[in-house]
Image (cartoon, helix red, strand yellow):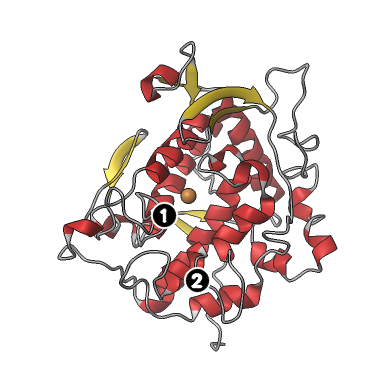
């Protein structure tokens, strides 16, 4: 039976399990150590939650192909953006189900387009940032389930970050968020989401941040006419700020609520346009890592290809899919 992924604001049981799952995976040794990933200092456990942080950073640092000027990498700035993060969420969801002992658990999503429809002052005080949900902003975050408590070593700690030269470093500090900086003062809106869904092309040459199509709009390099980047997914990262900005952004659990919504929007697009994906396997080797049968490898399990994740309705569905602009 497929699990249902729900809006985190509409189901308190799912919200509480998400929090519980994050905290449990934060404490659970993965069997890998910092030394396995070349992180300097005394070798210490990379716990399961932090293994996803390392995976994301590593993928983002691997340019595909090496040295390309557009910065296309193994997880971003190209068509693989959608399937790569879908595989990541799937593996996280399986780990949640295991650690919670609940095979019916589906990852929740944050419908940020809805919050983007609110006035600015209400966006930073929206329900998702309340103490019973994700807690608010701060350096460190001081409210909610991921607040830093100096006296409690089991309270939420960021364990792995990247330094200025892109190398992973072990740390132990509180989570940081800084909402609505001048780089992204407002969240994306539901109209912008609907406009993105109205784009019938998934992706197109040059398969990077300058491409036309749905993937690039959703990822957030191309905007509605006249609008200023960053857009949609990118804008959410920048709007939350702090630990949500760099390559180690899965350090903030809101990463997964953002990406579950991104995956929901991709699912809405797939449902509307016939589950198509480009480029196919005849595309040149310069697009390796982004073609339909190229493997998405992970330190957490078997690799999967884009083709294998275009229809996962036997595994999970969303409680609600938004519609493209111009449809009823
Ligand atoms: Cu990412």
Q: Position of residue 318 (x, y in %)?
A: 52, 61
- Sequence-wise, the earlier of marks 1 and 2 is 1
Front one among 157 and 168: 168
Tag of residue 260: none
Q: Position of residue 273 (x, y in %)?
A: 38, 78
Residue situated in front as seen by the camera: 217 or 152 = 217
Label 2: state its secondary structure: loop
Q: Which residue is mark 2?
A: 222
Whether label 1 lies within 8 Å of ligand 1 gets the answer yes
- Is residue 74 visible in the rendered structure shown here? yes
- Left-right relation of 34 to 64: right
Q: Quadrant of residue 287?
A: bottom left
Identify the residue at horizontal 67%, vertical 48% (top origin).
241
301 over 32 or under it: above or below: below
Cβ atoms at labels 1 and 2 below 8 Å apart: no
Up-down: is 138 above or below 223? above
- Counting other residues with Cα less than 10 Å from the Cα at mark 1, is it few (<14), some (14-19), or many (20 or more)? many
Q: Which residue is mark 1?
A: 76
Q: What is the tally of numbered marks visible in this picture?
A: 2
Q: Residue at x 54, y 41 (%)?
A: 250
Residue furthest right as drawn: 121
Instruction: Kindly report the distance in space between the C-alpha atoms of the residues bearing marks 1 and 2.
Output: 14 Å
**Where residue 212 sits: x, y (%)?**
40, 76
Q: Is residue 220 left or right of residue 183?
A: left
Secondary element at tag 1: loop
Residue ID at (48%, 17%): 45
């Amino acid at each position: 039976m497929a699990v249902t992924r729900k809006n985190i604001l509409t189901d308190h049981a799912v919200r509480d399990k998400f929090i519980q799952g994050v905290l449990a995976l934060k404490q659970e040794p993965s069997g890998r150590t910092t030394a396995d990933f070349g992180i300097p200092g005394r070798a210490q456990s990379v716990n399961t939650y932090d293994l996803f942080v390392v995976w994301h950073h590593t993928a983002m640092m691997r340019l595909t192909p090496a040295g390309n000027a557009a910065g296309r990498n193994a997880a971003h700035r190209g068509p693989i953006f959608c399937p790569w993060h879908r595989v990541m969420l799937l593996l996280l969801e399986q780990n949640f189900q295991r650690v919670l002992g609940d095979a019916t658990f589906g990852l929740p999503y944050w419908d940020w387009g809805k919050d983007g429809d609110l006035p600015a002052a209400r966006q930073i005080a929206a329900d998702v940032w309340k103490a019973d949900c994700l807690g608010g902003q701060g350096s460190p975050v001081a409210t909610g389930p991921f607040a830093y408590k100096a006296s409690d070593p089991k309270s939420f700690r960021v364990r792995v970050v990247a330094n200025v030269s892109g190398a992973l470093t072990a740390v132990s500090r509180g989570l940081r968020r800084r909402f609505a900086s001048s780089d992204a003062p407002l969240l994306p809106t539901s109209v912008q989401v609907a406009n993105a869904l109205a784009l019938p092309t998934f992706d197109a040459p040059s398969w990077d941040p300058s491409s036309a199509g749905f993937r690039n709009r959703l990822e957030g390099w191309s905007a509605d006419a006249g609008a200023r980047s960053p857009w949609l997914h990118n804008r959410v990262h920048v709007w939350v700020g702090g630990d949500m900005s760099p390559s180690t952004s899965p350090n903030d659990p809101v990463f997964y609520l953002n990406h579950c919504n991104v995956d929901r929007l991709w699912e809405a697009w797939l449902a509307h346009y016939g589950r198509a994906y480009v480029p196919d396997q005849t595309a040149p080797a310069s697009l390796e890592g982004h073609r339909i049968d190229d493997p998405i490898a992970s330190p957490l399990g078997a690799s999967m290809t884009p083709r294998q994740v275009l229809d996962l309705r036997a595994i999970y569905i969303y409680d609600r899919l938004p519609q493209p602009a111009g449809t009823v």
